[in-house]
Amino acid sequence: MTKKALFVWGGWDGHQPKLCVDIFDTLLQQAGFETEISDTLDIYLNKEKMDSYSLISQVYTMS
């Protein structure tokens, strides 16, 4: 079974949340994870997708 990770990012660009996500996305892919990146909180409304992730990381600044 493939491990799946979700990164949800947003907020103030000055804190560089997307850059942070990109760094950890690469690391997790190298560790064998299938990853998905979302720039909207609406992803949390999809219960089926949420149940499929083994790791969820929220990188949201100044919210």
Image (cartoon, helix red, strand yellow):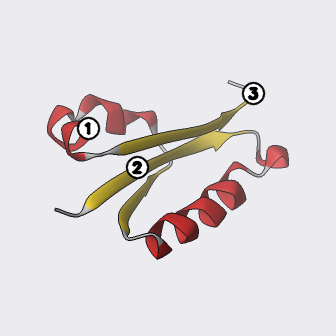
Between 27 and 38, the one lying in front of the other is 27
- Does residue 16 appear left or right of residue 38 in this picture? right
Mark 3 surroundings within 10 Å by alpha-carbon count, few (fewer than 14), some (14 through 19), many (20 or more)? few
Examine the image and state in which quarter residue 62 appears: top right
Residue that numbered label 1 is attached to:
50
Residue that numbered label 3 is attached to:
62
Q: Residue at x 29, y 58 (%)?
A: 3
- Whether pointer 2 and pointer 1 mark residues with C-beta atoms closer than 8 Å, the reply is yes
3D distance between C-alphas at marks 1 and 3:
24 Å
Amino acid at circle 1: Met
Residue that numbered label 2 is attached to:
6
| Number of marks in picture | 3
SS under mark 2:
strand
Mark 2 surroundings within 10 Å by alpha-carbon count, few (fewer than 14), some (14 through 19), many (20 or more)? many
Residue 31, position in %: x, y? 45, 69
Q: Quadrant of the N terminus?
A: bottom left
Amino acid at circle 2: Leu
Q: Quadrant of the C terminus?
A: top right
SS under mark 3:
loop
Please identify, in this view, whether the residue under mark 1 or under mark 3 is nearer the observer.
1
Q: Residue at x 39, y 58 (%)?
A: 36
Residue 20, position in %: x, y? 69, 55
